[in-house]
Amino acid sequence: MKKVNLSKVLILIPLTIVLGSCSGLKKMKDLASNAKYEVTPNVLEMNNGEVNLTISGTFPPKYFNKNAVVTVTPIVKYEGGQIELQSKKLQGEKVQANDQVIPYEAGGSFSYSDKFAYKDEMMRSTVEVKVTATVKNNTEELGSYKVADGIIVTPKLVRIEPKTVFLPDRYQRTVPVSQSAAILYEINKSNLRPSELKKPEVKALTSYIDSLSKNPRFKVKGIEIASAASPDGPVKLNTSLAENREATAIKFLKDQGKKSKLKVLNNDSLLSVLKTPEDWEGFKELMEKSDIKDKDLVLRVLSMYSDPEVREKEIRNIAEAFEEIKVKILPQLRRSKFVVKAEAIGYSDDEFLALAQSNPDIFTLEEILYAANLIKDFNQKAELYKKAAAKFPNDVRPKNNLGYVLIQLGRYDEAEAALQEAQAIENNDAVKTNLGAVALAKGDLAKAEELLTAAVAAGEAPNYNLGILNIIKGKYDIAISYFGNACDYNAALAKLLNKNYEAAINTIGCSKDESAQAYYLKAILGARTDNSDMVFNNLRTAVAKDIKLKAYAAKDVEFLKYFEDETFKSIIQ
């Protein structure tokens, strides 16, 4: 029997293992192109500042070495850097580990998802899958495979221009004013007694007439004189008394007009007169308010009889009550009542603008709010609202409107401070909407959502702003519901991102938006619907309006399939 050299055998065993390992890895490398790798979507999309992707692969039968561990690593490469995403380990059937097994005979597939934070440099990036295989201590690179080209960042085209709520003034340029007074007469007489002319209400009337004459901003609109006699006594006498009292009252008013040099009081076309020979309605009204004994009995007489003579007779029969009526009721019905109506006419718009510059301190609250609304320059508006807020610190409108204006100016910190002061006065939906707009503009989505959701009763503005917010969050269907029927750029963008292309085209069309952004959005819609004319025509207009869009379009993978098109190149170069 031939003797075996054990030392040589021991040397050959590990060498055989190594050669076997190398042979298996070499076969995998040689056949590496038979394995397939892909990323879904193959053009990535950014949503809410992140990019989600699914990496998958398929290995053919009799490819995956039973002793191999394969590591698949996606790498995002972009100008200025790269990032490695989560790796996936796969193992052959004989490997003692806990990774997914790929059978040798049948082959197999894998799939997993990952995400990464988007940076602006990544817009024109690529995704490669790097694959390595290891058997024992030997590792072989099986290659790198490009699986995605660029990232769609169309959600970043959202216009973060939140709608705000302005609280209106209640200014009225013409305000109706009036002054009334009543003169009482003695029984069966129609002359004016000096004591009546000294009554406070009559003095107030004459003073009012005097003020109308001295203030050109007042205009007399009408004069009413109602003269009456009490219902006691003969109808013929009472008719004569009512006529004479009317004549006396008219003369009194015209005399006041002459004294005050208010000629319009002598204008009979403005005069409306009413004579009531027997004022039973006035009598009934005063009786109802009185505490006269047998009041109910007297009122029953009025309801039972319509003939004035019968009424008077029956009431006189209630002897005790009639004595009180003669003292408390009837004297008040022997009268002439005056009402002088006028209009207070406010400043013209030109006067408002001049006074806003020279002397805003004379304005009332409603006037200063109205004046601020007339001013076109937002910085000047802000200064006037500051003055209004200082002068009228307990009204929410000046501070809310100051915040509203500061938002338009992009001065968000100042706007927030003003609105927080407004909120301390009255935490209404307008203030909450504007604070939500500030939070949205500053990127605080959680705070913006809380405020805007609480203010949805305010209507269009908070709902619109929640639409913007949900575009940013990548919830495009919810954004569409908040925009409602808005004919607006952002509403069209939400529909585009939700792949409702026909609706998006209709919405951007009805918006009548002539901005460069609107035309750029139409170009994207053309690319998504394979309408090259729509792409080129709208992109040509967009870059003509904003030349910076040339460089942007050159990187925008919405137009990936047009990058080598000569017409496209001519537009963006």
Image: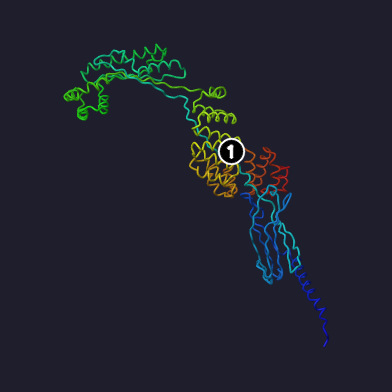
Q: Residue 73 location in percent, x, y?
A: 70, 59
Q: Residue at x 45, y 22 (%)?
A: 344
* In the foreground, 480 or 441: 441
Left or right position of 419 against 280: right
Residue at 24% x, 17% y: name it. 238
Q: Report the coloring of the rendering.
A: rainbow
Quadrant of the snapshot with the C terminus: top right
The local secondary structure at tag 1 comes to loop
**Quadrant in which the N terminus appears:** bottom right
Task: Give amino acid for label 1.
Answer: Lys
Q: Is residue 498 above or below residue 105?
A: above
Number of dots carrying numbers? 1
- Residue 555 in the image, given as x and y percentages of width and height: 70, 47
**Front position in the image: 274 or 207:** 207
Image quadrant assignment for residue 305: top left
Label 1 packing within 10 angstroms: few (<14), some (14-19), many (20+) = few
* Residue shown at 55% from the left, 49% from the top: 477
Q: Is residue 222 above or below residue 258?
A: below
Above or below: residue 488 compared with residue 190: below
Q: Residue under label 1, please give it.
A: 512
Residue 107 spot, x, y in % from top left: 67, 68
Indicate the quadrant where residue 262 lies: top left
View extreme (bottom): residue: 1
Q: What x and y, as percent, mark residue 306?
A: 21, 26
